[in-house]
Image (spheres, coloured by chain):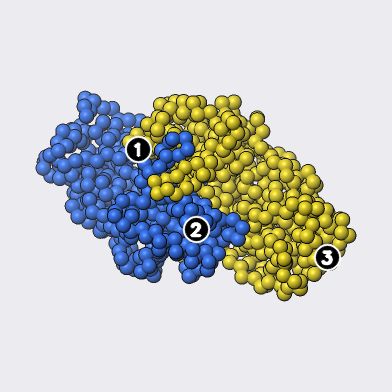
Chain colours: A yellow, B blue
Amino acid sequence: MSKGRLLYAQSGGVTAVINASASAVLAQARARRVPVLAGKNGILGVLREQLLDTSSISASEIKALAHTPGGAFGSCRYKLKSLEQDAAKYQRLLEVFKAHDIRYFLYNGGNDSADTALKISQLAQQSGYELTCVAVPKTVDNDLVLTDCCPGFGSAARYTAVSVMEAAIDVAAMAETSTKVFVYEVMGRHAGWLAAAAGLAGEGAKDAPHIILFPERAFDKAAFLAKVQDTVAKVGYCVVVVSEGVKTPDGNFLAQAEGSVDAFGHSQLGGVGPLLAGMVKDELGLKVHWAVPDYLQRSGRHLASQVDLDHALAVGKAAVELALAGNNGVMPAIVRTSDEPYRWHIDPVPLSRVANAEKKMPDGFIRKDGFGITAACRRYLSPLVQGAAPVPLAKNGLPSHLKLDLPMVRKRLKAWDK
Amino acid sequence: MSKGRLLYAQSGGVTAVINASASAVLAQARARRVPVLAGKNGILGVLREQLLDTSSISASEIKALAHTPGGAFGSCRYKLKSLEQDAAKYQRLLEVFKAHDIRYFLYNGGNDSADTALKISQLAQQSGYELTCVAVPKTVDNDLVLTDCCPGFGSAARYTAVSVMEAAIDVAAMAETSTKVFVYEVMGRHAGWLAAAAGLAGEGAKDAPHIILFPERAFDKAAFLAKVQDTVAKVGYCVVVVSEGVKTPDGNFLAQAEGSVDAFGHSQLGGVGPLLAGMVKDELGLKVHWAVPDYLQRSGRHLASQVDLDHALAVGKAAVELALAGNNGVMPAIVRTSDEPYRWHIDPVPLSRVANAEKKMPDGFIRKDGFGITAACRRYLSPLVQGAAPVPLAKNGLPSHLKLDLPMVRKRLKAWDK
């Protein structure tokens, strides 16, 4: 069964736990005595024949990989078109696979990566070259279909809930003579899962966040401002969580990246958070602060959830087993069988049904007024943020992360002529 | 010795550990059998005779207070003028002290609060009313003089170092096909201590952060852009940490709060981070992301340093002892006697020398090129971020925080006619 080599690569925005999946892939492949190569910077490294040799990684380093955020082998944003449109590139991939006796390809990413993996699985079938391609799920956006959740999301959700909770306590303490409205911007261009996770920060009617703005609901300026004013009147302050993807009623992003120019004539980059803050200040005359954690929320390994880490490890391990068993064109998905106690297992799903689909928040997860989450949403989210996944400290007192410096395997092909 | 009551109040921007000082004050005063009242929202609550009765707080709640961020009794930004200019207010304070037999007043805050405490200590002397006033240091800005560091700073420094470290790993993994420059904005309007703390994130020449911009150095646009470009060329990406207080050569803040208007005609609020990001994008054409953690950095109790927590507890305990011993007009300061192993103790310093002074970064802590910290700075900072101060988890899996709902003591005076 264990003929040839396994190639693993990371794709798209990295997360706090994508390296945990990598760690599980390495561990499981070793247990099965399959040599592992890693693509440098995802599929780009495969096209360039930049393949990292993982054999020098020690067992303790494999463990350390599991508590290191970011993408240890480098990731990329690089979308392949159809087999016909990008025929030369697929041909090149096939040559690289053949040259290095790669018989298993594991691509760790989100929607686009599932699509790439699907196409490579089809390429394998069409070409007659024996290759098994499996996608390993990962995205803080939680928008992959057919899996109950996506590894990476639980940790970003935990980051969001804890950060909003702590900041809200700060605002509450100072509200009488200082900031009355605090705006927190979360990632999630098309789906409001991370925005929803902020809802876990509070449970009571007066608890923050008082307003969550989802990309699934068109922004209603009047209703928003009325709710802010009402909350300040009743609670003394108002914490707003806004998804970067919130849109106007006509379907445009509320924050246009190129929307404004600062006093120096430079582009004022993005930020629906600062935009809403300006609106609140101008229209309601309230003192306002805003935060945009940006990459901090997806790389915050120090706040990773143990459940998310367990998921990330499980999909990595399962992907190796699925590949070795010859399951071409699948993705190990997380299947939930109980909310409380939380129970789950891994089942493979076909990539043809995963690629290019997008899971938005169901209507039943968004409160009728559009500004918060329902009890059903809370039941769904709560298990995913459970447990503080530990990170050992280095000698300098800060989290210990693994830094890999791997040799590249010798190239056997001509340079890639893209 | 233990006659009358002790009044404790919190002032200015709250921190991750100011409640730890409160916790120590409560514990120590109880050990000495001195009843403790707490001003609601700082000195404002004293003026309004809004005094919280802390006697119902249980011993376990006192412990929980030490791992709760924010200001449990409410804080305020409220500056009293001189004894002459604000004579009526000081008279009112004296009436409140007398009405409730307050013989010890502990004011927990930064520069302004030290000034208020100093004036109240003078008021006590002049009026002949027996009152001992002690300031308890606190500020994430670390800009109080005569103390080696300020409780609150070490935790915000740890938050900054860890966040920059994690985000930098994310950027490094994606740089080839995505973000090349990442800008992280830290608090510190006048002093660059928190910006400097980001320097702990990396040690090697190629490690992030590659550029730190301090308020102590005038912004040189050409030198900044050249350094960004050079770093991207050599390292592949560039992480910039900028203090909110960075100024132009003519002494104005680089980020003027009212500097721009967005596409909707609203104020584009602040953010030297997004401003620099726009500059990098426009002038160098590099893909850029930015983060502004704002209150997250000062309320991030989940990332508090154990050393900072120890300091916060120690100054709270010492303040009670100093007050009971009749040391009017002092502040317990942290005295460092050794960097490694880190050794320190508490000594009182006179408030007359603390109030209204500001400790900036010494020249020897900023690298000659102005873009980083020196080894001396690292030796100073490193002990302050040591140790992960634990936070127990609540049933919902998120950090457990104490919520106080204290009764107000019955008012004995007429309403304050401000």
| Residue A178 numbered tag | 1
Q: Amino acid at mark 3?
A: Ser
Q: Amino acid at mark 1?
A: Ser
Q: Nearer the viewer, residue A307 or A136?
A: A136
- The residue positioned 38% from the left and 44% from the top of the image is B259
Labels 3 and 2 positioned on one and the same chain: no
- Element under label 1? loop
Instruction: Single out the mark in the foreground, 3 or 2.
Output: 2
Q: How many neighbours does mark 2 have within 10 angstroms: few (below 14), some (14-19), or many (20 or more)? A: few
Q: Which residue is mark 2?
A: B284
Labels 1 and 2 positioned on one and the same chain: no
Q: Which residue is mark 3?
A: A2
The chain to which mark 3 is attached is: A
| Residue B155 makes an appearance in the image | no
The chain to which mark 1 is attached is: A
- Element under label 3? loop
Labels 3 and 1 positioned on one and the same chain: yes
Q: Nearer the viewer, residue A397 or A171?
A: A171
Residue A284 x, y percent position in the rendering: 40, 29
Q: Is residue B29 left or right of residue A143?
A: left
Image quadrant in which the C terminus of chain B is located: top left
Labels 3 and 2 touching (C-beta < 8 A): no
Q: How many neighbours does mark 3 have within 10 angstroms: few (below 14), some (14-19), or many (20 or more)? A: some
Q: Nearer the viewer, residue A172 or B28?
A: A172
Q: How many marks?
A: 3
| Residue A80 numbered tag | none
| Of callouts 3 and 1, the N-terminal one | 3
Residue B119 x, y percent position in the rendering: 18, 44
